[in-house]
Amino acid sequence: MKLSARSAVFGLVAVALAAAAVSVRSRFERDLALAAERAAQGSELIATRCGPIEVQQAGVGIPLLMIHGSGGGHDQGMAWARPLVQQGVRVIAMSRFGYLRTPRPADASPEAQADAHICLLDALGIARAAVMGVSAGGPSALQTAIRHPGRVSALVLVVPIAYKPGTVADSAPPVSDDKDALLLRLLGSDFLFWAGLQMAREQVIRHVLATPPEQVAAASAQERARVNDMADRILPVSRRAAGLRDDTRLGKRLGPYALETLRVPTLVVSASDDGFGTYAAAQYTASRIAGAKFVGFDDGGHLLVGHDDAVRADIVELLVTTARP
């Protein structure tokens, strides 16, 4: 090939690559803008004596404080709990410390977050509410019930990140420090996470959402949509990064809580194939709370794929029962 012809080919390749890069950047910026717009929908910033807290509310009836998991915010919490509105539940979905518009204070411990939950209820004029913690929302949900027992009518823990003693065996291997570092790098960049969703969504579902993608593929269209919506809602990760870092550190240093002091009706749910290994901790937690009900599934992963309706039915039964005079 003559030099001029070769140069022309290289020139065409360079132009094509540049055009592809422009196209990718345009798609990324469009999707990120849409994600940021969606993350802001329906929420308000409430001034409390513990500082500003972002919250989204829906429904009337039994008040339920919805505490989201890692990578979430009020939007993730509401997406999970909104179907309960049709069952006479008032969903109060908040953003925890370091997520979206709720600032991270110097003390972002589960105990401080629990006190902030009560500050939010006070600001909303709610004397007593059911409290539900999902995943990394579990520690502050538990601390709310421990520190403010008179304010919690029922406690629900779904795939909770919780303490278990070393003598309690777990079927899932522990999450390594290397994997944590890799996940934090992925979750620390809007572009990297967006690219992962575009090119390796199944791996995002497996490692970030801790759910077997093959189970998602075999699930109903409704369940597949729910899982994909959960993955998409992690964007923009840059607005959730402070909370994500706290959650990752917290999971490594959780100590035992005073579970034996709890006298609140409690439901604890997990799946044995949860990639975050919550099953044994959830089972142990339920065993230490008087009268707690444990519901365990053999499959479903961290998102309890295939069990969504059953879990919500158990939650509604608990809330309705505890709301009776």
Image: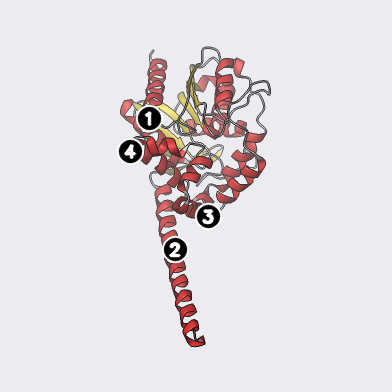
Of pointers 2 and 1, the one earlier in the residue sequence: 2
Instruction: Find the distance from the CA under tag 1 to the CA under tag 4.
Output: 27 Å
Indicate whether 41 appears above or below 294: below
Secondary element at image label 4: helix
Q: Position of residue 156 (x, y in %)?
A: 48, 24
* Residue type, mark 4 in image: Ala
Give the percent coordinates (x, y) of residue 134. 50, 31
The amino acid type, in three-letter code, at marker 2 is Val
Q: Which residue is mark 2?
A: 24
Left or right of 46: which side holds 51? right
User: How far is mark 3 from mark 2, CA to CA?
Assistant: 12 Å
Q: Compared to 59, does 147 lie above or below?
A: above
Task: Select label 1 or label 3 by which is in front.
Answer: 3
Dot 1 corresponds to which residue?
90
For badge 3, the amino acid type reads: Leu
Q: Earlier in the sequence, mark 1 or mark 3?
A: 1
Between the residue at mark 2 and the residue at mark 4, the CA separation in whole angstroms equals 28 Å
Mark 4 sits on what residue?
Answer: 221
Q: Give the residue type at disc 1.
A: Arg
Q: Which label's residue is closer to the chain start, 1 or 4?
A: 1
Residue at figure coordinates x 44%, y 56% from the top left: 32
Determine whether label 3 and label 2 are within 8 Å by CB.
no
Q: Which mark is residue 192?
A: 3
Relative horizontal placement of residue 9, taking residue 103 as reference (left or right): left
Q: In terms of sequence position, does the residue under pointer 3 or pointer 2 come before the other?
A: 2
Residue 92 position within the rendered picture, expressed as x and y whole percent measured from the top left: 42, 33
